[in-house]
Image (spheres, grey):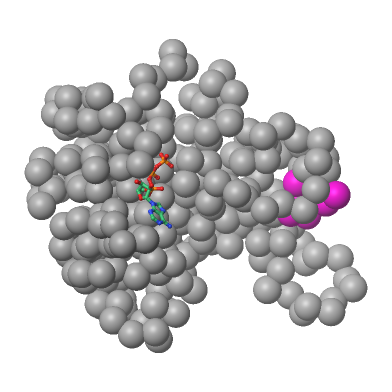
């Protein structure tokens, strides 16, 4: 069971996000990979319209949790549910759930010869005719530009991604997920290579963009300070179990100790 402030209201969530309870929930979920139990007894509520950061040391099960939420890894035990759908029991309910999700994994496959903007537009390629030779519609270009702006990349919109740094490419990958305007965004360390001097501004911009869109976000972060600045809720994992769930303020009081040994020290950013 979540051992900390699991049932408290999400007091860190701005009222303006219109938070309306869990977007996704897990009840006593266990996941096994290669014959080993990787997640066990995971009971979580992912609040709608808020940013939930998942932290924990390497191997704690963070990526597996994202993959479980995305339906890429089936739970061996327990139940997963989604708002508006209910328990995700059969293939059709998972299909409906996955249609509302955009995922940014660490290997964000971008097309090198295309510009940052065109890579982001590929995120909405399914919204125009596949054989269209016409320029991208104005509203999609606007959405793509807004998504790049949300990750501080508007100034490099026309640069081929082959000429972007690792951190810049990560941010383009994130913009490509944002432009889809999903209900649920799952992101696995999207800021891992971002220059530490940019993190503070980026977290502010990203947080503002997420709340304006009323997106539900689950984001894996190694940097505790980034999680602290970005998230409305923090989930701490250790050895495949939830050892903390609560607000950043509660995390400062209680969570750091629980996973302190488990997470890389924060950089001074
Ligand atoms: N396909 C697999 N088969 C067997 N074990 C796996 C598999 N994938 C991951 N694991 C194991 O599951 C555990 C959790 O892995 P996971 O990638 O979820 O951790 P993580 O917290 O995201 O780690 P990191 O921070 O290093 O990315 C690890 O012990 C890992 O070795």
State whether residue 28 appears in this view: yes
The quarter holding residue 69 reads: bottom left
- Which of these two is toward me, 217 or 65? 65
The residue positioned 78% from the left and 78% from the top of the image is 130
**Residue 116 lies in the magenta-colored region:** yes
- Which of these two is toward me, 229 or 43? 43
Left or right: 74 in relation to 37: right
The quarter holding residue 67 reads: bottom left
Reply above or below: 160 against 262. Answer: below
Left or right: 93 in relation to 157: left
The residue positioned 78% from the left and 43% from the top of the image is 161
Can you give x and y, in whole percent of width and height, for residue 9 in the image? 15, 48
Report the residue that reaches farthest toward the front.
35
The residue positioned 10% from the left and 41% from the top of the image is 4
Reply above or below: 129 against 216. Answer: below
- Which of these two is toward me, 187 or 249? 187
Left or right: 196 in relation to 166: left
Can you give x and y, in whole percent of width and height, for residue 243 in the image? 17, 41
Report the residue that reaches farthest toward the top.
268
Residue range (magenta): 113-119
Reply above or below: 185 against 159. Answer: below
The quarter holding residue 89 reads: bottom left
Can you give x and y, in whole percent of width and height, for residue 262 in the image? 28, 29
């Amino acid at each position: 069971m979540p051992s900390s402030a699991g049932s408290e209201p999400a007091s860190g969530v701005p009222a303006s996000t219109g938070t309306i309870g869990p977007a996704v929930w897990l009840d006593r979920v266990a996941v096994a990979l290669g014959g080993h139990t990787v997640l066990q007894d995971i009971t979580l509520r992912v609040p709608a319209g808020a940013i939930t950061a998942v932290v924990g040391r390497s191997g704690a099960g963070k990526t597996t949790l994202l993959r479980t939420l995305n339906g890429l890894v089936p739970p061996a035990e327990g139940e997963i549910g989604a708002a508006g759908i209910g328990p995700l029991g059969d293939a059709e309910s998972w299909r409906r759930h996955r249609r509302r999700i955009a995922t940014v994994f660490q290997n964000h496959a971008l097309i090198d010869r295309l510009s940052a903007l065109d890579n982001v537009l590929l995120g909405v390629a399914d919204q125009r005719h596949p054989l269209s030779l016409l320029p991208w519609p104005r509203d999609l270009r606007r959405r793509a530009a807004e998504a790049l702006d949300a990750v501080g990349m508007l100034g490099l919109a026309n640069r081929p991604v082959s000429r972007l740094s690792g951190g810049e490419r990560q941010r383009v990958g994130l913009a490509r997920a944002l432009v889809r305007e999903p209900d649920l965004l799952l992101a696995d360390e999207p800021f891992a290579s971002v220059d530490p001097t940019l993190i503070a501004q980026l977290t502010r911009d990203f947080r503002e963009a997420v709340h304006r869109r009323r997106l539900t976000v689950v984001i894996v972060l190694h940097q505790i300070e980034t999680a602290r600045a970005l998230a409305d809720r923090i989930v701490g994992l250790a050895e495949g179990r939830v050892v903390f769930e609560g607000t950043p303020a509660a995390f400062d009081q209680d969570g750091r100790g629980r996973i302190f040994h488990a997470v890389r020290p924060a950089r001074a950013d």
